[in-house]
Amino acid sequence: MEEILLEAELREGKGRAKAKDLRDSGYLPAVVYFHGKDAVSVKVSRGALLKLVHQHRLESVIINLKIKDDKKAKGRPCLVKEVQYDPVKEDIIHVDFNEISLTETIKVNVPIQLKGEAIGVKQEGGSLEHLLWEIEVECLPTNIPKDVQVDISALKMGDAIHVKDIVFPDGVKPLNDPSAVVLHIVAPMKEEVPVEEGVEGEAAKEPEVIKEKKEVPGEAAPADGAKDKDKDKK
């Protein structure tokens, strides 16, 4: 197991003003919890924590937190419980640590790492649908895997990998539903051919039939002379 060191110092005082002063001086307020005992308020270097964030996946690595003037000279093995961010600037503003025992099993989420290129994608034109990106496991802190490797090279169209199909290292127990689908190869969706429409999106209209005016019963038809007069007026 890789040992990740992070130095800290005890801090006094609480409240927004104190926390702001810490951040302005290059530190971050933090709290260490352990099995229901009194929490320990500390401060850690902002730069040192950001370096760890960029180099490791903090949710599943053990940090040996060495607190200055702490009775536990060897440090406290911890997992990051929560990282709080500023809602506007998105900067880290607070960290919570969970102190753990190296001899007791814990539950953590481990990322899934795919290996190879599926036959169903490479040769058959299918698409890979990745549904489950992490798996929750139970193990000793010293056995936490960096990731879970899944080889997809032999997958053909319609094939799938379930949680029960994955081989885990000794001492690592998956907690997800064994039948849960991690990924599968599906056929590409067919594109529908759009139906052609008439001019400006309207269907072509039938030509309008002009009908002669019907005579109303009881109404005499105009005499030929009257017709001629009408034509003369025009």
Image (cartoon, grey):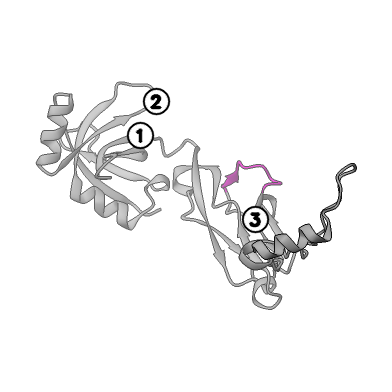
Tag on residue 160?
none
> Along the horizontal axis of the image, is 18 left or right of 50?
left
Going by the numbered disc 1, the residue's amino acid type is Glu
The residue range painted magenta reads 171-180
Name the residue at 25% across, 48% down. Answer: 49
Asked if residue 153 is positioned above or below residue 39 in the image, the reply reads below
**Disc marking residue 166:** 3
Tell me which residue sits at (19%, 50%) in the image.
47
Viewer-side residue, 184 vs 52: 184
Q: Based on the displayed image, in which of its 4 quarters is residue 89 positioned? A: top left
At mark 2, the secondary structure is: loop
Residue 15 in sight here: yes
Say which of marks 3 and 2 sits in front: 3
Position in image of residue 152 (x %, y %)? 64, 66
The answer to which of marks 3 and 2 sits earlier in the sequence is 2
Q: Which label number is shown at residue 99?
A: 1
Q: Amino acid at mark 2?
A: His
Between 174 and 119, the one lying in front of the other is 119
170 sits left or right of 37 in the view: right
Labels 3, 1: front one: 3
